Image (cartoon, rainbow, N blue to C red):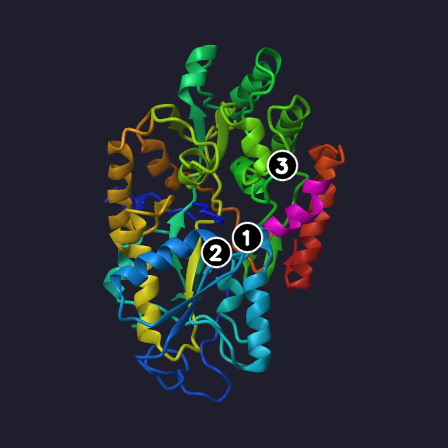
Amino acid sequence: MVRFRAARRSRLVAIAGAAALTLALAACNSGGGSTAGEYGFPQVKQDDKATITVWVDADRTKAADAFTKANPGTPIKVVTYDGSANGSNSFRTKVQLFDRAQSGWPDVVFSSQNNDAAWASQKSNGKQAFAAVLNDGLVAKDTLDQFTSGSLNPCTVDGKVYCLRNDLAQAVLWYNKTLLDQFGYQVPKTWEEYQALGEKVGREHPGYIVGTVGDAWTPEVFFWASKCRANGITGPKAVTVDTGSAECKRAATMLDTLITNGTTPNVSVFTPEFVKKYSGKVLLMPGPAWYAGAIFNNPESLNVPKGQLGVAPPPAWGSDKAVTGNVGGGTWFVSSHSKNLKAAESFVRFVTTADDYQVAVAPGYPAYAPAAEKWVKKQETSGYYATDLTAVVEAGTSIWDGWGSGIFSQEAVWAKTITPAIAGGKSLVSLLPEWEQAIKNQAQVNGYTVK
């Protein structure tokens, strides 16, 4: 969304009603002693000719290119950074430096994370928040209303919208239909069937895989889908963490089995090692919608041939109704400090809604519903997929709302605590207490009361 990809949706307007837990944070929109400007926050003197500085990750340079091509008269400076990938927190860290200096802020920022509105909407040392309020007139209500229902929840703080979603990142079950047919396997409908198939693949077709645990968003794919309450944001500064629950243990036990037999390796999908070792060997892959363009239909990654890639709904646990997680999706922020809000708004509106980028170029499922409808049609008429994309469209309604968007990054906690421990041979079941403590520690550092 992508992220990464990017890493990363009428019927489309309803698909993500549970896409994320709306942040229940109290926001304050005005700086110390300043009066609110035209759009509900203090504004510096505007200059419609001022160059806007836009921060993007490597994948979103194409979005900037598309904007520049469509708006050649708008002065723009593009700066690439990591997009806060893997919970690096680089966006927040850099903004904190600018806040202390009271200068240097970029006009627009892309982040691969969904938790940045939690801090970007808040005052910094008594000064105004970094993120501009978008729904007090800066972005037209008609535009905001056409984003898929629920998709702006991670951007919404106390009724104010502080960012626009780039794409939706609901997790689904990707699979290679050609290989499944060749091996005589069926697409699993439950996680129990998924594990059994993984065990069978380990015995009958060693070297083939059914997933990975090497990326920082592994808990969002597997543990979120198991209703593991590792990230239950229940208030402005309250979180419930319980990785010792049966829901957490069942996901960990399943993964331990598949890690041990080699069908779910501890390798990131964005490494040369993964591409070299597993090209043509991915039988199944639970993962976000944006995997389609980011790793499968990508000449620089797995490059799965046309007509092989299928997509199925996320598996269920037993007889329970299937739920899924949300892996990023990407967010665009306008700085409240911008000297050219007109151009900054034009940029974020273009890259999230314009067909020139979201339909023609973007690899992930657009959060803007009119673009999503066209994106699906384009994908299906391309003939690339072995199935239709109904599962991608409908998975958005299955995102479990018990996993929130707090200030701290679950991905950073996982990457630092769990990934290296798995590499060291420890089981996930044995690591659950350590994971819980690491989450609690990070939450408390950020001022959360932990239950």
Sequence-earlier tag: 2 or 3: 2
The local secondary structure at tag 3 comes to helix
Q: Position of residue 255 (x, y in %)?
A: 63, 29
- Can the viewer see residue 125 in this picture? no
Q: Position of residue 139 (x, y in %)?
A: 30, 67
In the rendered view, would you say 214 is above or below 145? above
Left or right relative to 2: residue 136: left
Asked if the magenta segment contains residue 304, the reply would be no
Q: Residue at x 32, y 32 (%)?
A: 389
Q: Residue at x 73, y 42 (%)?
A: 433
Report the front residue among 328 and 436: 328
Q: Position of residue 244 (x, y in %)?
A: 68, 39
Report the front residue among 270 and 449: 270
Look at the magenta stretch and give its main secondary structure. helix
Q: Position of residue 159 (x, y in %)?
A: 40, 65
Which contiguous range is marked in magenta? 410-420
The residue carrying mark 1 is 85
Pointer 3 local density, CA inside 10 Å: few below 14, some 14–19, many at least 20: many
Q: Residue at x 51, y 25 (%)?
A: 282
In the rendered view, would you say 46 is above or below 324? below
The residue carrying mark 3 is 248
- For marks 2 and 1, give the CA distance: 9 Å
Left or right relative to 386: residue 244: right
The residue carrying mark 2 is 57
The local secondary structure at tag 2 comes to loop
- For marks 1 and 3, give the CA distance: 25 Å
Sequence-earlier tag: 2 or 1: 2
Amino acid carrying mark 2 in the image: Asp
Amino acid carrying mark 1 in the image: Ala
